[in-house]
Amino acid sequence: MKILIVEDEPELATRIHSRLTEDGYRCESATLYKQAREKIYVYDYDLLILDINLPDGTGLDLIRLAKQEKSTTPIIVISARNSLNQKIEGLELGADDYLTKPFELAELTARVKSVLRRWSFDGSNQITAGNITVDPDDKTVTVDGADLNLTRTEYSLLLYFMANPNRVLSRDSIAEHIWGDHMDMADTFDFLYTHMKNLRKKIKDAGGTDPIKAVYGVGYKLVKL
Ligand code: CA
């Protein structure tokens, strides 16, 4: 799961970034409206966390932009206590949740979990494909009820496929989802092949029905009946 954090207060931005990284999310940060706009245009995120008041613009315009570009990406707005009108406007524009500063990081991570679950898995705590079950809360995977040990990258890959069943996911979008935009693409594809091979081998070795199909020259697709 890849999250963009847009917050111009350095200390708060850092605290959110490290907390969500500890929780296993892949995080990127932007401190300026322009930076955030660029990232939202170019990259796919699973969640946007947006501060409303930025030095060079407003988070509300970022919501408008995100809705124009990728209408399904969920959004959590964080803003100052005295901005009720902005809260209402943010929710009207399509933000999924709203947190008033100052807030406990535990509260933010609870909201993040809940928004992502609502969005990816229709409210269910577990997601299955064939005899494979993923529990995003516990970050566990089972095959026919038996635990399957995956590396963090393999788990992230599987969860990404589970969240996007029956959709062809390009190598670019998978690599970007897992490693962000900081890696050289040629290297990234080699890494991706290796991790995909290992993931699929582990599933098969555990007696799982491998639901992932390679789509020649494009990427991969999780087939779910
Ligand atoms: Ca601010």
Image: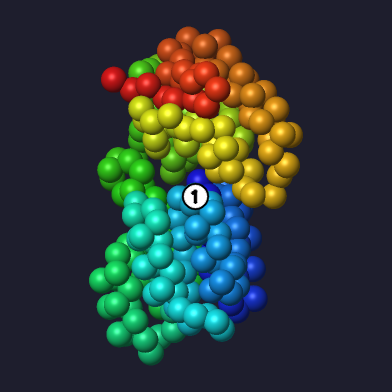
Q: Is mark 1 within 8 Å of ligand 1?
A: no
Q: Residue at x 64, y 49 (%)?
A: 181
* 218 up-or-down from 62: above or below: above
* 45 up-or-down from 36: above or below: above
Q: Residue at x 27, y 78 (%)?
A: 88
The amino acid type of the residue labelled 1 equals Asp
Where's the C terminus, which quadrant? top left
* 145 up-or-down from 183: above or below: above
Tell me residue 164's x, y (percent).
39, 35
Q: Is 15 on the left or on the right of 3, as rendered?
A: right
Q: Is 12 on the left or on the right of 85, as rendered?
A: right
Residue 186 appears in view = yes
Tell me residue 129's x, y (percent).
36, 23
Mark 1 Cα-neighbour bin, 10 Å: few <14, some 14–19, many ≥20: some
Tell me residue 10's x, y (percent).
64, 76
- Residue 186, picture quadrant: top right
Residue 143 appears in view = no
Q: Which residue is mark 1?
A: 44
Q: Residue at x 30, y 85 (%)?
A: 85
